[in-house]
Amino acid sequence: MLAAIDMGSNSFRLHIGRFENGAIRVIKSAREPNRLAAGLDKNGFLTVAAMKRGVEALTRLRSVLSAYPISAVRAVATNTLRIARNAQDFLQAAEKALGHPIEVISGEEEGRLIYLGVANVVPDSDEHRLVIDIGGGSTELILGKGQEIERVESFSIGTVKQSLSFFPGRAIDQSSFDAAILSARSHFEDAASFYHAGNWKFAYGSSGTLRAIAEIISRNGLGKGDLSPGSLNALRDSMVQFGTIDGMKYVGMKFERASSIVGGLAILIALVQELGIEVMEPVEAGLRMGVMWDLHLQDTQGDRREQSVREFQQRFHSDEVRGRRVADDALTLYLAMKPGSDMYDKHLLYWSALLHEVGVSVSPTNYHKHGAYLVENADLAGFTAREQRKMSRLILGQKGNLRKLNDPFAEPDMVKALLALRLAVLFMHAKVAVDLKALSLKVKNRIDFEIRNSLISQHPTLMYWLGRERDWWDEVGIEFVIKSN
């Protein structure tokens, strides 16, 4: 079973599903409303009360997870935790409450996962399609053809802020709606040419807010009952007639979602006007479904991160032959040190080694620093921010002093991964082939490195570089013992 947790700006949601007969069947869903985005103060900090609500919500979701035999879990956090200045403080408590790592994903990664979820639910075809997801803190527009994404952008406008900003006191009138729509249009106008109706054949709405708007229109006989300009305007006019958010009475609308629906409708009308959308189809798929598909595909058909690494190498003209040599040697050395049973670091080490020279395209001087910055800050599809930070530290630590890493040595496998990469880079520059028959490497309370005399005699500078390596490890309190035989 697969589990996806979406820590959105309005609510935290859980899907538990199973892959069956070519599709993922959702067998359990849970929703914990908490309006996290509304808990941001004027300085961009989450309030204590908002963090407490979030932790309590995750504790309840953990109890749901515990009732199922889950094989893979992925929890992703979106816009509010991307922008909250004290997000790390909350995440520490949140991960403890949930019992799983939480990944703050970029808006572009959010869009990729949303599209993945939609593309595997709608009829399989090569149609050009636009997918729109209006969330509590951001809106994603994804243009694609079949399974392939052609363009994805995340816009920092969502239902929570739009509702709070333009409907103060929860009052609704025509001028407030007009202002909310005009404001929303300003966010999209610069990118409108890319997503205009002439560039796609079908438009899909994937978020819960869009599906709720569609249900209200349909069940209350507004317009033609579809997501079209006429029906959306009819819903807006009826909201204005109610006069307040609290006074809205619609069949199929949950009271706690009223505020987000008003803000979401303003954004949706703006998109319809700006992009020339004549009709949109709501679809029961989005971020959570995309996360589960991503977990399934990683397990069965290859990891999207592999493709991202290849594309990154090509974008920065990194020498793929040298990268592959260092990656193969680093992996050989890492496995020789008998790391823990969790092979998570094995993959990150290999990808880091493939990318260890991407910084050369910026400058050959201090290329490891440039490469570390690029890898940490780039949008690498499939990777989490946590994974990119870990890879960045490996790339930064591939040579030179180890003090710059700010103590990554609490994790034994991280020490082994770092040592393996450093030695692989050293051996490549010294033109030494890694041969486990000619050397051995052990890491316990210290590093024990043993090498054959014949290898030393063939490569006179090798002992010099190994001596430097020993000194750098000694500087951070790890003894590096070199023996020859």
Image: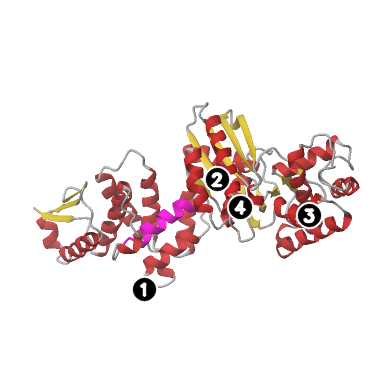
Using the image, determine if residue 46 lies above or below residue 125: below
Marks 3 and 2, how far apart in space?
A: 31 Å
Which residue bears the numbered disc 4? 80
Front position among marks 3 and 2: 3
Highlighted range, magenta: 385-398
Give the CA separation, mark 4 to mark 3: 21 Å
Looking at the rendered structure, the secondary structure element under dot 3 is: helix
Q: Which circle's residue, 1 or 2, is located before the other in the chain? A: 2
Residue ID for mark 3: 168
The amino acid at mark 2 is: Val
Q: Which mark is residue 76?
A: 2
Label pair 3/2, CB-CB below 8 angstroms? no
User: Which badge, 4 or 1, is on the more N-terminal residue?
Assistant: 4
The residue where tag 1 is placed is: 365
Q: Earlier in the sequence, mark 3 or mark 2?
A: 2
Front of the two marks 2 and 4: 4
Does the magenta segment cover residue 390? Answer: yes
The stretch drawn in magenta includes residue 157:
no
Disc 4 element: helix
Query: Can the viewer see residue 301?
Result: no
Q: Which colour style is shown?
A: secondary structure
User: Which residue lies at the image location 79% right of the left edge and 59% below the top edge?
Assistant: 274
Q: Residue 167 location, x and y as percent?
A: 79, 54
Q: Mark 1: which secondary structure?
A: loop
Residue 138 picture location, percent across and down: 66, 53
Tag 3 or tag 1, which sits nearer the N-term? 3
Graded by Cα atoms within 10 Å as few (under 14), some (14 to 19) or many (20 or more), the crowding at tag 2 reads many
What count of labels does the image hold? 4
